[in-house]
């Protein structure tokens, strides 16, 4: 059994994200926006990093790209393969860590990640790997949650109850333009940002909170952690519902996301 905190963190992530499958329907619409923003074209070789159930990969495949996906969680990859088979298309899925991508240098024309690479503990290692496997002149693009809006605020709330281990960066920082620019560094040119919205159906803030508690690893982990502390769990849930309530209206929760794109030098 390893005692290295980062290895332990990733092992926990690998298992915890297995529950994400039901939320796939919430990421489908956003995937089309990212694939558009990345200007994916027929014949390009493309990698979907932290692909989960393969939503971005399959969207890009429909545009004619030759696609591979990579993710830490075997349960999500099994779902991705099943979905791919049921759609009658070809996408290769690989188990792997964004901090050690199992591909040769300069393998892809396009490298994408939707709400994925932002969960790697070391952002600079993750971005360096994504740029390493990208061809010179190729495009990197990713979607993250803006620092001041719902999902980033939710991760900050989770962090108050379940602090991240030492050496693990906060995912919310990926929603800040200046931080994103700094992490992309001098290895890229033409950094551009854009925003889009996606809408999640819900009967009430608690209805969405229940789905997040069941399917989004950091939220699931905090609820498990607070199981023995009912008063704190109740307080966490009240704050979670109040936060979601700020974005809830007429059975919809509006989520704005940030897209970033750049070209490798
Ligand atoms: C919010 S889900 C997004 C999944 C998918 N991209 C989508 O849009 O539906 C986050 C994903 O990041 C993956 N992930 C987290 N840490 C990772 C790492 N270090 N390397 C690869 N994948 C990772 C999880 O397994 C999970 O599939």
Image: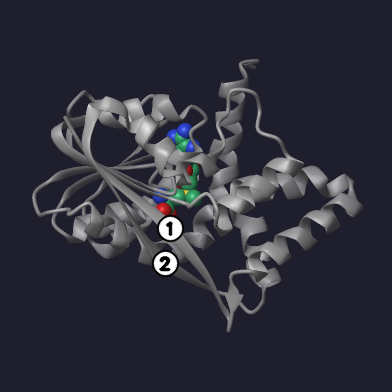
Q: Secondary structure at mark 2?
A: strand
Give coordinates of residue 130: x percent, y percent.
31, 32
Asked where in the image residue 195 lies, by quadrant, the reply is bottom left
* Residue at the farthest front position: 178
At horizontal 83% and vertical 56% (from top left) the residue drawn is: 235
Judging by the rendered image, the residue that carries numbered circle 2 is 197
Q: Name which residue lies at 21% across and 43% down.
A: 46
Task: Verify CB contact (< 8 Å) between mark 1 and mark 2.
Answer: yes
Query: At which x and y percent is residue 244?
Result: 64, 66
Q: Quadrant of the N terminus?
A: top right
Q: Is residue 183 above or below residue 42?
A: above
Q: Position of residue 248 (x, y in %)?
A: 60, 74
Residue 13 in percent (x, y) is at 57, 37
Work out how far the residue at label 1 is from the one at label 2, CA to CA, in angstroms. 6 Å
Task: Identify which residue is drawn at 68% across, 41% down.
Answer: 159
- Residue at image location 82% in from the left, 46% down from the top: 226
Toward which corner of the image does residue 257 lie, by quadrant?
A: bottom left
Residue 257 got which mark?
Answer: 1
Say left or right for 144 vs 227.
left
Query: Which image quarter is the C terminus in?
Result: top left
């Amino acid at each position: 059994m390893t005692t290295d905190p980062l290895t332990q963190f990733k092992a926990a992530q690998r298992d915890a994200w297995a529950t994400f499958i039901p939320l796939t329907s919430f990421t489908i619409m956003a995937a089309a926006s990212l694939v558009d923003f990345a200007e994916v074209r027929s014949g390009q070789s493309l990698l979907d990093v932290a692909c989960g159930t393969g939503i971005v990969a399959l969207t890009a495949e429909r545009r004619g790209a030759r696609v591979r996906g990579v993710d830490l969680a075997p349960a999500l990859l099994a779902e991705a393969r099943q979905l791919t088979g049921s759609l009658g298309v070809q996408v290769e899925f690989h188990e792997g860590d964004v901090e050690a991508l199992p591909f040769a240098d300069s393998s892809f024309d396009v490298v994408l990640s939707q709400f994925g690479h932002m969960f790697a503990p070391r952002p600079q290692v993750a971005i360096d790997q994504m740029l390493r496997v990208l061809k010179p002149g190729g495009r990197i693009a990713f979607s993250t949650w803006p620092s001041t809006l719902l999902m980033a605020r939710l991760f900050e709330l989770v962090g108050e109850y379940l602090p991240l281990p030492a050496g693990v960066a906060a995912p919310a920082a990926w929603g800040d333009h200046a931080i994103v620019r700094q992490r992309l560094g001098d290895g890229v040119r033409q950094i551009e940002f854009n925003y889009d919205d996606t809408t999640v159906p819900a009967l009430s803030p608690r209805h969405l909170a229940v789905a997040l508690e069941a399917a989004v690893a950091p939220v699931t982990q905090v609820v498990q952690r607070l199981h023995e502390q009912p008063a704190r769990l109740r307080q966490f849930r009240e704050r979670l519902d109040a936060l979601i309530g700020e974005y809830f209206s007429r059975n919809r929760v509006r989520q704005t996301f940030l897209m970033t794109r750049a070209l490798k030098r």
